[in-house]
Image (tube, helix red, strand yellow):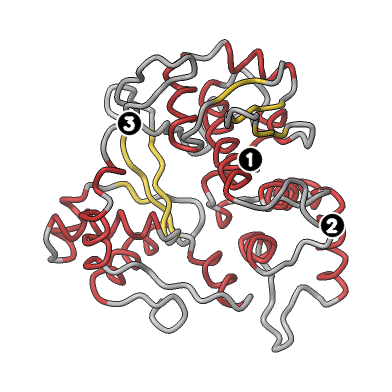
Amino acid sequence: MVTELGLTGNALLVFAMIHGFTKDGNHQYVGSFEYIAEWLGISLRSAKMIIKNLISDGYINRTQNLTDRRRPINVYTTNYEALLARVAAGEVVKPTSVKAGSASDKVNGAKNAPLKKEGVNGAKGGSLMVQKFPFNGANSAPNNNYIDIYINRNYSSYRPESSQEEEKLFKIIFLFRNAADPAAEVGKFISWNEARGWQTRDGAKYDTVAKRASLAEYGWDCKTGQRLPAGDITDKYYKFLKEMISIALVSGDIDPELFLSTKNKYRVASNGSFVWQCLREVKEWVKGQPREKIVGAIDRALSMPFAFEQ
């Protein structure tokens, strides 16, 4: 945690505490900011800021247990193995310091305010909250478990029933990495690494799903090229797609697989609008969702006028 992941001070204590509860891959940490602060002997303000930074930096995940619908409970896991795999792939990972995070909030405070932006039809939107959904919740169909795992980045908990199931996880990773042909990319990725025994030159092994998934995300150059033009709009599109999948996982009334079709894409109209070209089933589902959910996703991901392809 110190030498590879750059953790120090109170951030190290918080990360280690959560990891101690969740490292078996079967449990999640459930506890309040107050409990973390009291247990570690740090201020409540520091506990809140550290948790916020560790989530933002990808060190830990926060989801919600919605068993009691009246009071959602925050639950946490760490990305320990995935982070180490990124380091093994040559990436430098480093958490944001509490001081730096606090300064960023002061500079970008407006970004954390409730969103009040133009909606789909130009109407003013109200205050919008990020859509939360339960990890492996009752609304998530078993055959879509790998999608839930990808959205949560909780690879260490994934126990695929077959190599084909693991390949589905790789496929969604490469789709969101904008590979021209995600399925073909999976084949190249697996063939290359199987020929090398799934290990680095110095003998470090990619012997878990978490390590192999992180290798696909951070340590592999896509051989099939890019599906959509690289740039800010494409980045926004994939962020928007994740928002839509998150809503679908909660609603449970559409197969999230439909959002992964390479037939779904976008274009930018002459008037600057983002035009989503998607499957008919997806389009009809979106139109049937509560307006505030869709407007919220558009605000968070796109921040530009939105329309469907006619």
Of helix, strand and loop, which one carries label 2?
loop
| Amino acid of disc 1 | Ile
Quarter of the image that includes the C terminus: top right
Q: Is residue 73 left or right of residue 38?
A: right
Residue at the disc numbered 2 = 224
Neighbours of disc 2 within 10 Å: few (<14), some (14-19), many (20+):
some
The structure residue drawn at horizontal position 67% and vertical position 69%, both measured from the top left corner, is 219
- Label 2 is placed on what type of residue? Thr
Where does the image place residue 305, in percent across and percent down from the top left?
Answer: 52, 27
Task: Mark 1: give few (<14), some (14-19) or many (20+) Cα within 10 Å.
Answer: many
User: What residue is pinned by disc 1?
Assistant: 147
Residue occupied by mark 3 = 115
Residues under labels 2 and 3: Cα distance? 38 Å
* The N terminus, quarter of image: bottom left
Asked whether, in this view, residue 75 is left or right of residue 298, the answer is: left
- Determine whether the residue tagged by mark 3 lies in a helix, strand or loop: loop
At 20% from the left edge and 58% from the top edge, which residue is drawn?
A: 47
Viewer-proximal residue, 308 or 102? 308
Which callout, 2 or 1, points at the residue further toward the start of the chain? 1
Q: Residue furthest bottom?
A: 202
